[in-house]
């Protein structure tokens, strides 16, 4: 389930849905929403949803979302899955992806 939508973008709502499923194969896709951020941190929302995070959807890395903190929390939780890139169309896609990958690596650095 993607943590997305009018109500389900709120981590407490998504956590309640996940608690109701009670199934190990059901998880969430962290969507990197503004609603994840509480007092400048994603940690409270991350801790709430951590047991069910199966995928991570990244929007624009070049904004003020606390990416470095998110990557740190993912490492600490031993997340070994994918992070999905969603960005605006680029006229130079190969160049953009090289830049994006370099920024991703920098933000994910210990």
Image: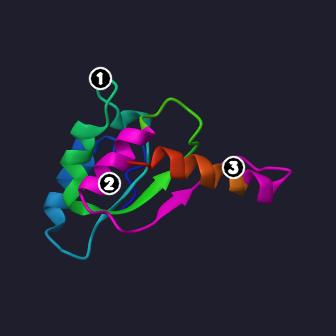
Magenta stretch encompasses residue 29: no
Quarter of the picture holding the N terminus = bottom left
| Snapshot quadrant of residue 78 | bottom left
- The furthest residue to the bottom: 25
Q: Which residue is mark 2?
A: 74
Q: Nearer the viewer, residue 71 or 25?
A: 71
Q: Secondary structure at mark 2?
A: helix
Left or right, 60 with respect to 15, comes to right
State which mark lies toward you, 3 or 1. 3
Left or right, 37 with respect to 91, comes to left
Left or right, 47 with respect to 73, comes to left
Q: Which residue is mark 3?
A: 99
Q: Secondary structure at mark 1?
A: loop
Magenta stretch encompasses residue 79: yes
Q: Say which label, 3 or 1, has the lower sequence index.
A: 1
Q: Nearer the viewer, residue 2 or 37?
A: 37
Q: Which residue is mark 1?
A: 39
Q: Secondary structure at mark 3?
A: helix
Residue 9 in view of the camera: no
Mark 3 in CB contact with mark 1 (< 8 angstroms): no
Residue 8 % position (x, y) = 34, 47
Q: At 26% across and 41% down in the image, what residue appears?
A: 45
Q: At 13% across and 69% down in the image, what residue appears?
A: 22
Q: At 23% across and 52% down in the image, what residue appears?
A: 49
Q: Around disc 2, counting alpha carbons within 10 Å, would you say few (fewer than 14), some (14 to 19), or many (20 or more)?
A: some
Residue 18 % position (x, y) = 21, 60
Residue 107 in view of the camera: yes
Q: Say which label, 1 or 2, has the lower sequence index.
A: 1
Q: Say which label, 2 or 3, has the lower sequence index.
A: 2
The magenta-colored residue range is 67-96
Residue 7 % position (x, y) = 34, 42
């Amino acid at each position: 389930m993607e943590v997305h939508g009018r109500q389900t973008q709120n981590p407490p709502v998504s956590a309640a849905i996940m608690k109701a499923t009670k199934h190990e194969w059901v998880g969430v896709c962290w969507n990197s929403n503004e609603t994840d951020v509480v007092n400048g941190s994603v940690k409270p929302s991350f801790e709430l949803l951590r047991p069910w995070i199966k995928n991570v959807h990244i929007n624009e890395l070049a904004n003020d979302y606390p990416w470095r903190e998110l990557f740190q929390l993912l490492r600490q939780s031993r997340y070994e899955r994918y992070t999905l890139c969603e960005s605006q169309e680029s006229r130079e896609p190969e160049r953009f992806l090289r830049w994006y990958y370099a920024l991703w690596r920098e933000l994910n650095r210990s």
